[in-house]
Amino acid sequence: MSRRYDSRTTIFSPEGRLYQVEYAMEAIGNAGTAIGILSKEGVVLVGEKKVTSKLLQTSTSTEKMYKIDDHVACAVAGIMSDANILINMARVQAQRYTYAYQEPMPVEQLVQSLCDTKQGYTQFGGLRPFGVSFLFAGWDKNFGFQLFMSDPSGNYGGWKAAAIGANNQAAQSMLKQDYKDDITREEAVQLALKVLSKTMDSTSLTSDKLELAEVFVLPSGEVKYQVRSPDSLSKLLVKFGVTQAPAEAS
Amino acid sequence: MECVFGLVGDGFALVVADTSAVHSILVHKSNEDKIMVLDSHKLLGASGESGDRVQFTEYIQKNVALYQFRNGIPLTTAAAANFTRGELATALRKNPYFVNILMAGYDKETGPSLYYIDYIATLHKIDKGAFGYGSYFSLSMMDRHYHSGMTVEEAIDLVDKCIIEIRSRLVVAPPNFVIKIVDKDGAREYAWRESVKDTSGAPTA
């Protein structure tokens, strides 16, 4: 292994790899899975919570889902403290845009500007990259509902369905099989919960192990970001039959 | 004194500006185009300090173009107007631009719009507006004859009325005007109103 090329973020290895960026992605591979699915009527984000204690104050804080602006939210996988910095940067960038143009920032531009920041940490300054991957869900008047995935390298892509964190490859291939282009909002929620339940290590899914959030448009035309309450989430899990994992056949 | 005025009609917006470039008592030229085509569907009529006018409007034009190259979508008229106002506001308490602007645009979703942006970064969305000494006459004329949803013919008729008033009542009235229009088909020059033409040379015997 070319260990001598590991320690500086800003140099390539002889094989043309950036080891620090790859190690950052390793760190994310141990984090709780997050899945995003795009439907015609909204975007759903589901996340697996790693910190599950009865003592946690769940009503006021979320572990996986964060609102960036009224029309954009994100799910996080990786080092939480790194994520907080980037989420704050994204919030500032969104407000800066609105300050200049008096309009909400288009989703892709927000993702792009955050990714430009992340890229900076792979090229200069000598600081390590951020150990976070994001799933951005949002709506803008140019392209409607959108889902973007970004990683520590500063690369991003637009997706119909995507997964980050632990077992993301397994989740991604399940999504590829079951996703259809004209999926409705409810079907997307169902698919997300189903895929998450299959990729999670735990034997039974309960609402305290998950977070679910949706970005959709109200009849008034206003964009809404809503995190499901634990009760509402429990009901959904029962409805879609994903609470009792041992009872499932396949 | 420079005259710029504009109005919004049914599915279009007009901006009219005089075309004199004046320095003290000398008229350098009388076919100076002060209405910049900002992008395919936006017009920027500007009046004020001539160096600032060109510098600032070109700066805005290039930034609007850069946005479109970077992001693949054009700015809306409202966004461009707010951006312009922001630039004037930032420079105001350091190095102000002495430029007054009427920005007109057509957006597919919202139709035609007109924005009044003065040199101290005031921004108003308006149906009709004017800058300069000519505004005393053109605003009064528009207040009397303007109604919303005017056709192009009606609007041009009103513009001509305003020009007649300026020519007959303003002591140092500019002789020539240019009229530009923006609608769903884009921003373009509509017509000139000339009463003095630049001659091509001295008559030869």
Image: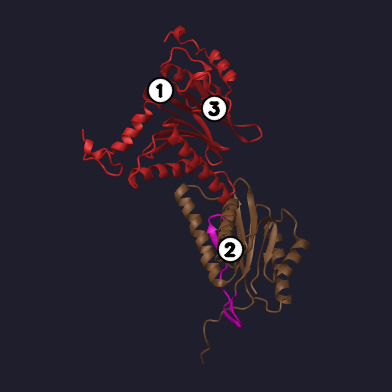
Chain colours: A red, B brown
Q: Is A82 positioned to the left or the right of B145 in the image?
A: left
Whether residue A145 appears in this view of the structure is no
How many residues crowd around disc 2 within 10 Å: few (fewer than 14), some, or many (20 or more)?
some
Quick check: is A89 in the magenta stretch? no
User: Which label sits in the foreground, 2 or 3?
Assistant: 2
Q: In this rendering, is residue B91 above or below A149? A: below
The subunit letter for the residue under badge 3 reads: A
* Residue type at numbered disc 1: Ala
- Of the 4 image quadrants, the one containing the C terminus of chain A is top left
* Residue holding disc 1: A171
* Residue holding disc 2: B92
Residue A68's spot in the image, x, y percent? 53, 38
What residue range appears in magenta? Answer: B20-43
* Residue holding disc 3: A213
Using the numbered discs, state the Cα–Cα distance from disc 1 to disc 3 in whole angstroms.
18 Å
In depth, the one of A214 and A37 nearer the eye is: A214
The subunit letter for the residue under badge 1 reads: A
* Residue type at numbered disc 2: Leu
- Of the 4 image quadrants, the one containing the N terminus of chain A is top left
In depth, the one of A199 and A158 nearer the eye is: A199
